Image (cartoon, rainbow, N blue to C red):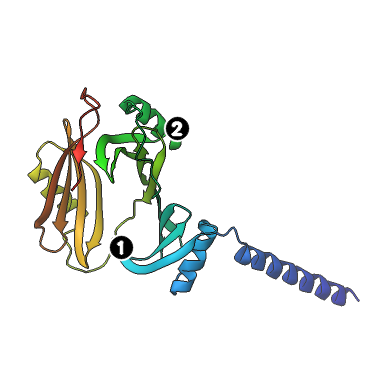
Amino acid sequence: MMKKFRTKITAMMCMMFCLVAAGVLLTPNTAFAKKITRDSQAESMARKKVKGGTVVEIDKDYEKGNLVYEVKLIKGTREYDLTYRASNGKLIQYSWEEHKLNRSTKKKIISRSKCRSLAKKQVKGATVLSLRLKYDDGIDQYKVKMKKGNKNYELDYHARTGKLIGYEWEELLKPKNSNNGYIGVEKAKQIALQKVPGATVVKAKFDRDDGKAVYEIELIKDIYEYDIEIDAVTGKILDFEQDTRDDYGYDDDYYDYDD
């Protein structure tokens, strides 16, 4: 009798352990547990993130050696872009852009300090890296770049209404180790610093430009910010851009005109 009782207790304990283990494995709160292998998986995840959105495009690409799924959606007057890491289904980039813009307003351009305040309220605790007034898409816009933790942010504000018309955050990925013959991000930083001596690197990432492996380096020095694109295999500088950053006492009628 005692032996049967012990057997029942043992069986019940085993059953309870299995149920608990199953609960842990099946709980919907388990972070990034699903590997993405099909477009339909990425589409489903994007639809849950942007409820009511219509998926218009799905692409596969590589970022720092990591396979990613890029999903574009439309909802109302906004266009959304979401990027998921294939290995674990984690959302690593999220952005939206407003397409219905007020181009007829005659209001005065808000000050840079006002725009900076709006950005800091939008991304609490972030550091403002640059703030520029530009004329883009037929309107005056403030472009704000920020950083918080392991994420970079870019915010676009209508310079006359103060309305947020574009928003993006991107997680800083670590390069995936592989014997691919790439020069490495540290070497790319050195090349960029040789091009702009005395500058500070604020962002460095591996990317693919039309299928070509490149390193994109952002630097700041004095009143300028620099964007440099470097061939990931040869180390050759493919593109170099210089622009004025932050206000540094410049008047609000200073513009950068996009082509």
Q: Nearer the viewer, mark 2 or mark 1?
A: 2
Question: Which residue is identified by label 1?
Answer: 176
Q: Quadrant of residue 179?
A: bottom left
Mark 2 is on which residue type?
Lys
Q: Quarter holding the N terminus?
A: bottom right
User: How busy is the neighbourhood of tag 1: few (under 14 within 10 Å), some, or many (20 plus)?
Assistant: few
Q: Quadrant of residue 224?
A: top left
Point out residue 222 in the picture as x, y percentages from the top left corner.
16, 30
Q: Position of residue 177 (x, y in %)?
A: 28, 64
Q: Is residue 35 left or right of residue 172?
A: right
102 or 165: which is nearer to us? 102
Q: Residue at x 32, y 67 (%)?
A: 61
Q: Which residue is mark 2?
A: 121
Contact between marks 2 and 1 (CB within 8 A): the answer is no
Taking 174 as reference, is 221 above or below it?
A: above
Residue at coordinates 15% horizontally, 37% vertically from top-left?
199
Instruction: Please tell me which residue is depicted at 81% across the width and 70% down the height of the picture.
Output: 9
Residue located farthest toward the top when viewing the structure as drawn: 249
- Tell me the element at label 1: loop
Mark closer to the chain start, 2 or 1: 2
Viewer can see residue 149: no
Say what secondary structure mark 2 lies in. Answer: helix
Camera-side residue of 176 and 164: 164
What type is the residue that disc 1 sits on?
Lys
The one of 208 and 1 positioned closer to us in this rendering = 208
Q: Is residue 221 above or below residue 93?
A: above
Residue 257's tag is: none
Query: What residue do we see at 74% from left, 71% from top?
Result: 15
Q: Is residue 223 above or below residue 28?
A: above
